């Protein structure tokens, strides 16, 4: 099974970014399937490039498997639901030949 990737785009000046990262990290610690969390700060070249590509005007932002899923801080339940939906789509994609 391929892991689910959660990318949290943060800003050091954003008071909500630490909470978004904490929610994502807590979710991963409770998962029974592979999930990888990565933080990209907009003060890095990588993070700024991602923010520009997505036309982000605020942080935090959360991408799941490369798709912008949240701008702002989701609840734990919202994040779980989005990850489970991504997991189901990944499973469907891997069970068919294209």
Image (cartoon, helix red, strand yellow):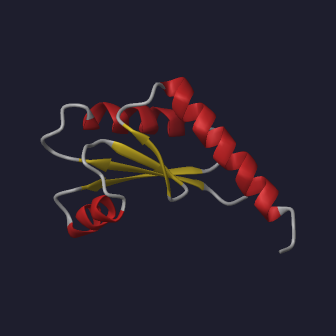
- Quadrant of the snapshot with the C terminus: bottom right
Vertically, is 34 above or below 26? below
Q: Classify residue 8 as left or right of residue 64.
A: left
Question: Residue extending furthest bottom?
Answer: 98
Which residue is pictured at 54% across the width and 29% down the height?
78
Q: Nearer the viewer, residue 40 or 60?
A: 60
Q: Classify residue 12 as left or right of residue 91.
A: left
The total of numbered circles placed on residues is: 0
Residue 31, horizontal then vertical, whole percent: 61, 37
Residue 7, horizontal then vertical, whole percent: 42, 52
Which residue is pictured at 42% across the width and 31% down the height?
23
Question: Residue extending furthest right?
Answer: 96
Q: Quarter-wise, where is residue 93 in the image?
A: bottom right
Residue 32, horizontal then vertical, whole percent: 67, 39
**Can residue 30 be seen at all in this image of the molecule?**
no
Q: Classify residue 52 as left or right of residue 98.
A: left
**Can residue 8 be seen at all in this image of the molecule?**
yes
Residue 29, horizontal then vertical, whole percent: 52, 36
Vertically, is 17 above or below 41? above
Vertically, is 97 above or below 52? below
- Quadrant of the snapshot with the N terminus: bottom right
Which residue is pictured at 25% across the width and 43% down the height?
58
Q: Nearer the viewer, residue 22 or 55?
A: 55
Q: Quarter-wise, where is residue 22 in the image?
A: top left
């Amino acid at each position: 099974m391929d892991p689910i990737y959660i990318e949290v785009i943060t800003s050091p000046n954003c008071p909500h970014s630490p909470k978004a990262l904490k929610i994502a990290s807590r979710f991963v610690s409770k998962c029974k399937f592979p999930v990888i969390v990565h933080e990209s700060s907009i003060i890095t070249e990588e993070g700024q490039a991602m923010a520009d590509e997505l036309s982000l005007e605020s942080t935090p932002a959360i991408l799941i498997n490369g798709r912008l899923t949240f701008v702002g801080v989701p609840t734990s339940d919202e994040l779980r639901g989005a990850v489970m939906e991504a997991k189901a789509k990944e499973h469907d994609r891997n069970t068919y030949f294209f």
